Amino acid sequence: MSFALITVVFVIGYLCIALEHPLKINKTAFALLTGVLIWTIYIMSGPGIYDFTGFGAGYEAFKAAHPDSAKPFIDYLTTHELIEHLGDIAEILFYLMGAMTVVELIDTYGGFSIITDHIKTTSKVKLLWTLSFITFFFSAILDNLTTAIVMVALLNKLIPDKHDRWFFGGVIILAANAGGAWSPIGDVTTIMLWIAGKVSTGKVIIECFIPSLISMIIPLIVISFVERGEIDVSKRKVEKTGFNIATWKRNLIFFLGIAALVFVPVFKIITHLKPYMGIMLGLGVLWIVTQLINRDLVSQVHGDDGPDFQELSKHLSLTGALSRIDLPSILFFLGILLAVAGLQSAGHLSMLAGGLDTAFNGNYYLIDMVIGILSSIVDNVPLVAGAMGMYDFPMDNMFWVFLAYCAGTGGSLLIIGSAAGVAVMGMENIDFIWYLKHITPYALIGYLAGAGAYILLDKVLFGSSAVATALATLPV
């Protein structure tokens, strides 16, 4: 009963998030409520929740290791499961906070004008293609989440109309997820597969690049015949900070901020520490630099009659940038990830992954494609983690490489299906239903086109339909 109730709570919470605008209640409230309720039902159900799924091996191991525990199930959830998931969630949240702060700081100094000043076109179609390709390749280097945050900041400078900006933001999500799917550091799922030794760098780049590119280009081609017109540049926001910022300071913060973002994957490769450590390192450097370069700001710019030094210093420092980041978006992430973690811990996602093999009779192309579609609903990370624990194919097997594509691009089908989508949704307050109507059809066309391209290339060019000769074809 509790097992089914958790599913019901998740579905209701999901629907409430989707219907945020008609209900006129912020989606963050529903996300937090859903996440907490799932764990509350889970812990109050007792170990009997595992009777339905047989997913209690971890609990049994915990009891054996802690024979003195008076309440082993509660201790297992609170000191093991929840803490472990919270650690993973915190990594994402702190990274998100760091990346958003860097972007906010660059924006404060007017650094994005270095890019926007060179984008002269007012054609919607040309601008969509330009921004999409920038996003596609940036995503492979930075990762899709960071790239989405940066590009939304650019959109705010280029696109004055809200609904135009929503549409561009939706296309940015498609491009960011497509770009992240062919790089071993471009998406959290490709990072998982890469670190676990399921795919190699060369294999995922060579075999996923063309399908990922197609998944972006096909929607752009269709959109080019639909979304015509010009951007009304007369309505673009004019930055009014109340004081002038020296060009050298603007350039320094821009390039230092971008360097901090680009350095994150490099730092991870060198040290093997998680990405949030790299972004915190960058924040520390930027914090020191901003305070050093603004020591004489008041006397140089405003003279004796200028505003208080501490006020200006705070506005242009990391302290000010931290106070302006979108905290509700971060809490929305927390709620969604808590909810999905509950489904993973209770066995819902493992049961789902196990059912896919039976339902599709070992057709691994279809299994990967369904995992990609489902990843737009329940997050691609636990689904990929479940698949990694379920199958024992060798490194660079078709299943793993195609899974990297499907899990990376499938999240674009719904706006809360990927980290990039959730970030853009929070920053621009994009409506779930609006995205479903205006972006999902293009995302689906691109997803299927890219999947078809991969299957064709796999059979004709790469000749790596190695599923038949895999070491294991049954769930482990």
Image (cartoon, rainbow, N blue to C red):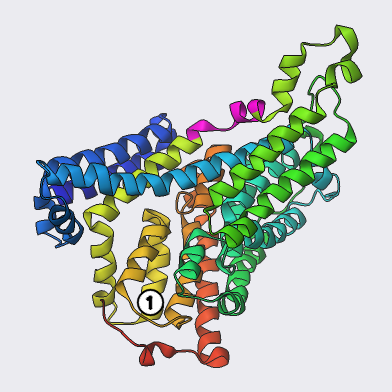
Q: In this image, 304 relative to 321: left or right? A: right
Q: In this image, 298 relative to 161: left or right? A: right
Three-letter code for the amino acid on which mark 1 is drawn: Leu
Label 1's element? helix
Camera-side residue of 259 and 134: 259
Give the x, y percent position of residue 209: 62, 74
- Residue at the (62%, 56%) spot, across then down: 267
Q: In this view, does 20 lie above or below 84?
A: above
**Magenta region includes residue 437:** no
Q: Can residue 382 be seen in this view?
A: yes
Q: In this image, 62 relative to 191: left or right? A: left
Query: Circle 1 is placed at which residue position?
Result: 366
Q: In which quarter of the image is residue 334?
A: top left
Camera-side residue of 327 and 157: 327
Q: In this image, 38 relative to 119: left or right? A: left
Magenta region: which residues?
319-328
Characterize the magenta stretch by its predominant secondary structure: helix
- The outermost residue toward the top is 305
| Quarter of the image where the C terminus is located | bottom left
- Residue at the (51%, 32%) spot, across then down: 327
Give the x, y percent position of residue 79: 26, 43
- Residue at the (8%, 51%) spot, across then down: 48
Give the x, y percent position of residue 227: 67, 54
Q: Is residue 62 above or below residue 166?
A: below
Q: Can residue 225 be seen in this view?
A: no
- Residue at the (67%, 46%) spot, across then down: 150
